């Protein structure tokens, strides 16, 4: 499945949440991640995030069956991490 995740986290916990998200997804922009993920890894991701956040924090995850019917358009600078290594 494909997911888009974004968060609004207290700055004291941002680095921990960022590190967790980077284990599973691709960083796209400040506080935004996207990528293909298995159901099992999504469950782990949610569990990891719940253990590092508090009630005042907000994490929103959109789940899609696939990216087949989606279009991604960037206006301005594409901050998405380059994950292709030679």
Image (spheres, rainbow, N blue to C red):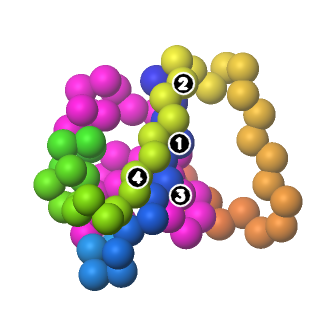
The residues colored magenta run 15-44
Q: Is residue 59 left or right of residue 51?
A: right
Residue 72, image quadrant: top right
Q: Secondary structure at mark 2?
A: strand
Q: Residue at x 25, y 52 (%)?
A: 49
Q: Is residue 79 above or below residue 50?
A: below
Binning the other alpha carbons within 10 Å of mark 3 as few (below 14), some (14 to 19) or many (20 upward) gives: many
Q: Earlier in the sequence, mark 1 or mark 3?
A: 1
Q: Secondary structure at mark 3?
A: strand
Which residue lies under the disc numbered 1? 4
Q: Position of residue 68 (x, y in %)?
A: 67, 20
Q: Position of residue 44 (x, y in %)?
A: 20, 38
Determine the CA span between mark 1 and mark 4: 11 Å
Q: Earlier in the sequence, mark 2 or mark 3?
A: 3
Which residue lies under the disc numbered 3? 32
Binning the other alpha carbons within 10 Å of mark 2 as few (below 14), some (14 to 19) or many (20 upward) gives: some
Which residue lies under the disc numbered 4? 59
Q: Residue at x 40, y 52 (%)?
A: 59
Q: Is residue 77 left or right of residue 40?
A: right
Determine the CA span between mark 4 and mark 3: 10 Å
Comparing labels 4 and 3, the label whose residue is closer to the camera: 4
User: Is residue 33 within the magenta segment?
Assistant: yes
Viewer can see residue 82:
no
Binning the other alpha carbons within 10 Å of mark 4 as few (below 14), some (14 to 19) or many (20 upward) gives: some
Q: Earlier in the sequence, mark 1 or mark 4?
A: 1
Viewer can see residue 65:
yes
- Residue 54: image tag: none
Binning the other alpha carbons within 10 Å of mark 1 as few (below 14), some (14 to 19) or many (20 upward) gives: some
Q: Secondary structure at mark 4?
A: strand
User: Is residue 85 within the magenta segment?
Assistant: no
Which residue lies under the disc numbered 2? 64
Q: Residue at x 31, y 24 (%)?
A: 39
């Amino acid at each position: 499945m494909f997911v888009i995740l974004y968060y609004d986290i207290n700055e004291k916990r941002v680095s921990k949440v960022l590190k967790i998200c980077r284990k599973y997804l691709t960083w796209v922009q400040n506080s935004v991640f996207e990528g293909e993920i298995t159901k099992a890894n999504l469950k782990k991701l949610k569990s990891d995030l719940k253990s590092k956040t508090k009630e005042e924090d907000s994490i929103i995850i959109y789940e899609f069956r696939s990216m087949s019917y989606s279009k991604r358009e960037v206006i301005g600078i594409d901050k998405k991490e380059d994950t292709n290594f030679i």
